[in-house]
Amino acid sequence: MDLDFSPQDQAFQAEVRAFLETGLPDDLRAAGRRLTSVFVDKKYSIPWQKILHAKGWVAPTWPVEYGGPGWTDMQRYIFQIECARAGAPGLAPMGLRMVGPCIMRYGTPEQKAFFLPRILSGEDYWCQGHSEPGSGSDLASLQLRATSDGDDYVLNGSKIWTTHAQWANRMFCLVRTNFEGKPQAGITFLLLEMDTPGIEVKPIITLAGEHEVNQVFFTDVRVPKSGRLGEENQGWTVAKYLLEFERGGGSAAGLQMSLKRLRALAQVEPADTGALIEDADFTAKLAAAEIAVQAIEMTEHRVMSALSSGKAPGPASSMLKTQGTEAMQRIDELAIEAAAYYANVDQPSAREPGSNVEPVGSDHNLIAMARYLNNRAGSIYGGSNEIQRDIMARLVLGL
Ligand SMILES: Cc1cc2nc3c(=O)[nH]c(=O)nc-3n(C[C@H](O)[C@H](O)[C@H](O)COP(=O)(O)OP(=O)(O)OC[C@H]3O[C@@H](n4cnc5c(N)ncnc54)[C@H](O)[C@@H]3O)c2cc1C
């Protein structure tokens, strides 16, 4: 893999930098820098998505025919790195990275023509209705019942841990259309509108005190069959395809920024002790984290080239998911160590972009504890890391 920038790549990097310099507003930059979770609030991600959409840069991995920019792997990598460096907020993955590729692969021409432009523009904001109170790792056991009634399905049951359901106007949802036989063979993939009568969204507040996830209740919810993606009882095939995209996707650029922030934090010299960066034990842990992030970057290149040649990332996405989330948690732990007692001062109002509340200590330790708590979820969401290891054992090691 050649990671040296060619003159064309250098020119592209300069173009991206120049665009970010003027195109990324200060409030969104501040929001990106002070992010306490991998899930960016809609109020920050959508304005940035609209700016990128106007520029034609919103969906780096999408084929040109659906609105992708036609970049090479290296250009996508450069874009990702430069956005992270500039502190740009991430974009919500549910539309662009998850349901979008599924619609391209399994959608009818009408579904493609309707949904894909709305995903690109941010007009539609999606949430993912897969997990249920009794079905997470064992997703195929899901029970949300969809009864056929004329041109509609009638839905009853519940979904849980639904990220940003409080803001989404659409959900992609796995429902049970057949209760007999193999569980996987009775699942259907539906696209539905969140304002349909009978849907109720209830918040779940996380350990970090934030509202990201929800439980969603369905009582006699009528969903037109035209919202079905793929055939009835074939939803598991679509879901498996989607999960590879959910697990893949960029993380090294963000991790590099977390490392940079961690280094800055460890360089601060408290009055009573020396700077942590001079402590041999700490620097050994920091070096190990840096090596892990470099390895992730290389894996990410492999996943990106699979995506750009129209292939699903396969088991490499499981590797990326486990390594990425564990590196993130390792960096968070070191940040807590570096922030020391300041990590315990929670200052939500100082974290708001544009706030005039001065952070106690440095800007970096402002978010250390919130990130630590939020990112504990990293090894659970998107399929827990134990399940990812099972997948790798089967698909890579043939066990
Ligand atoms: C912050 C957050 C956001 C989320 N967002 C969404 C969302 O938007 N939409 C959505 O549908 N879901 C979402 N989820 C749900 C997520 O996909 C599930 O939490 C995850 O799949 C694990 O399922 P579970 O919580 O039911 O845990 P369980 O499946 O009950 O697992 C509990 C523990 O047992 C382990 N375990 C289970 N089975 C095995 C096995 N066979 N071998 C070894 N270990 C095993 C697991 O690794 C885990 O440690 C989100 C979760 C979180 C935390």
Image (spheres, rainbow, N blue to C red):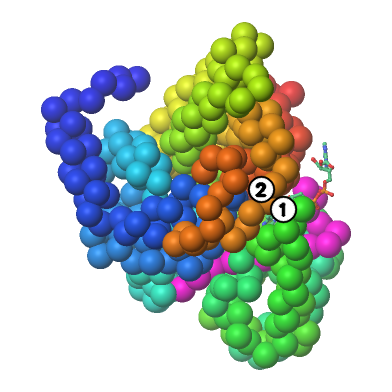
Q: Is residue 132 above or below residue 86?
A: below
Q: Give the quadrant of residue 147.
A: bottom right
Q: Does the segment drawn in magenta span residue 149?
A: no
Looking at the image, which residue is at 26% across and 21% down?
Answer: 4
From the viewer's side, name the closer residue of 8 and 129: 8
From the viewer's side, name the closer residue of 95 and 291: 291
Q: Is residue 285 above or below residue 143?
A: above
Position of 389 compared to 230: left or right? right
Task: Give, as a three-letter code, the residue at label 2.
Answer: Ala
Find the magenta span and give its range.
124-141
From the viewer's side, name the closer residue of 230 and 56: 56
Q: Does the segment drawn in magenta span residue 130?
A: yes
Residue 161, x across and y down, in percent: 73, 61
Q: Name the residue tied to disc 1.
A: 208
- Secondary structure type for disc 2: helix
Position of 310 compared to 235: left or right? left
Residue 1, x across and y down, in percent: 34, 20
Looking at the image, which residue is at 60% across and 17% down?
Answer: 274
Residue 162, x across and y down, in percent: 68, 64
Task: Give, as a three-letter code, the residue at label 1.
Answer: Ala
Looking at the image, which residue is at 68% across and 64% down?
Answer: 211
Q: Residues within 10 Å of mark 2 (few under 14, many from 20)?
A: many
- The answer to whether any part of residue 122 appears in the image is yes
Position of 325 compared to 217: left or right? left
Q: Main secondary structure of the magenta part?
A: loop
Q: Give the quadrant of residue 309.
A: top left
Q: Name the residue tied to disc 2.
A: 370
Q: Are marks 1 and 2 in contact (CB under 8 Å)?
A: yes
